[in-house]
Image (spheres, rainbow, N blue to C red):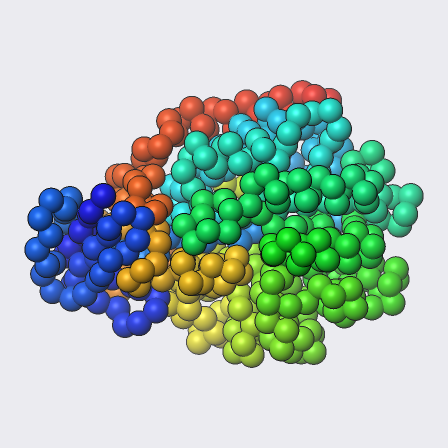
Amino acid sequence: MSLIIENVHLAPVAGPEIPAGWLRIEGDRIAGLGPGPAPDAPGAERLDGTGCLATPGLVNTHHHLYQWASQGLAQDATLFEWLVALYRVWAAMDAEIVRGASAAGLGWLALSGCTTSSDHHYLFPKGRGDLFAAGIEAAREVGLRFHPARGSMDRGESRGGLPPDEVVEDLDEILAATAEAVDAYHDPSPSSMLRVAVAPCSPFSASGELMTQSAALARDMGVRLHTHLAETVDEDEHCLEQFGLRPVDYMDKLGWLGPDVWLAHTVHLSDADIAKLAITGTGAAHCPSSNGRLGAGIARVSEMLRRGVNVGLGVDGAASSELTPLAGEMRQALLFQRARYGPRALTARQALELATLGGARNLGREGELGTLEPGKLADVALWRVDGPYAAAVADPVCALVFGPALPLVRLLVGGRTVVADGELRTAPQDALGRAGAEAGRRLLERAGGAA
């Protein structure tokens, strides 16, 4: 396929913006871009981008897709209260519920400009089908690039952990299932649509042995590592009480800092913690809406960026961030940083970089994703900025980041159209939404009622 988008404002993230230019796609790659009229390209499809802004596709670096089926519960809870309320609800899930929830969640992400999403699935009730495969099937249907992280928990209440014992797995079982998932699904090729990470859930639900053996497994198999860290003050207190260390120091002791690791949330970091992440090349996934919903706090994103820590964005599980679009997290990130540090704390273009190149770096794909450059994968979002209201904003990147989500004219994943004129073209979007709602109904019915 050959496609030229012309007469468009280009925000490549890498390199200067082009207020009126063109972008050429050949197959699944960006072949060129530049200012002025588009070059001749016999046989190419031409898309008029007048009044539009082209950006790299957005990259979601932390999510729990199964949680689409449990939105609106434990509305006024802290993280630990929320988890205690929902663990037993989630324990009722099966593969059908996960597939319906994942399809709806991924469809929603696509409609907000997301071309690549991670998914951290860490709860595997026995005898309920292949839950990991269910999420992968949903991603294939929707057509997004997918980075599922095989999560795990082995530290239940009887071992000082937070989750009930009935929702955790045995260490040997976890390691075997994780290795099987990597063998079955991980595709390291440059054009890959599917890569697997290893992701024990958190310090309060995974033993030190699980963390260290998972890290060894991931590094032996050449895949990345992911976990939750430093999300709340409660977690700080738990780590100090149980391990005698704060979360980042505990991860350092376990060998869990490095350029192959990205950590979700990182809200409660000291100056020394930030320095450790920067020195080791450890990434962070910032989830502002979820952190706000649970009252967890505001991550020190501006300071992390200033000191050289890579930061991407994450929507987080829909049960702690109801119906949150990924594009909206750019705005939330910007506003949260400015509320804490002042109006120069984060710019619109920095927020866009968090959502694109920052996310690509977290996933180890900055050579393939996250910018509009020749040779990179043709994952592109085209936003309408000349609508009757959005046109009042002189700067199109400001309109995208400062305001509510803009209409999505086209979303391309590897050059393939996933969204056109605000509608999914790979799967019936209303049917996906109904499947997500039905998954929620079935989950609550199986769990015996709402939390």
Q: Residue at x 8, y 48 (%)?
A: 42
Please indicate, yes or no, whether residue 37 appears anywhere in the rendered image.
yes
The answer to whether residue 284 is above or below residue 5 is below
Residue 383 visible in image:
no
Q: Is residue 337 left or right of residue 254?
A: left
**Residue 251 coordinates in the image, percent (x, y):** 74, 65
**In the picture, which quadrant includes the C terminus?**
top right
Residue under the point 31% across and 60% down: 375
Q: Residue at x 30, y 63 (%)?
A: 373
Looking at the picture, tell me which residue is in the foreground, 404 or 49.
49
Left or right of 91? Residue 109 is left
Q: Residue furthest right?
A: 158
Position of 185 relative to 436 (above/below)? below
209 horizontally vs 193: left or right: right
In the picture, measured across the screen, residue 61 lies left or right of residue 295, that is left
Q: Residue at x 67, y 50 (%)?
A: 199
Q: Is residue 146 above or below residue 392?
A: above
Q: 298 or 411, which lies in front?
A: 411
In the image, residue 28 sits, relative to residue 341, either above or below, namely above
Give coordinates of residue 317: x percent, y percent: 59, 44
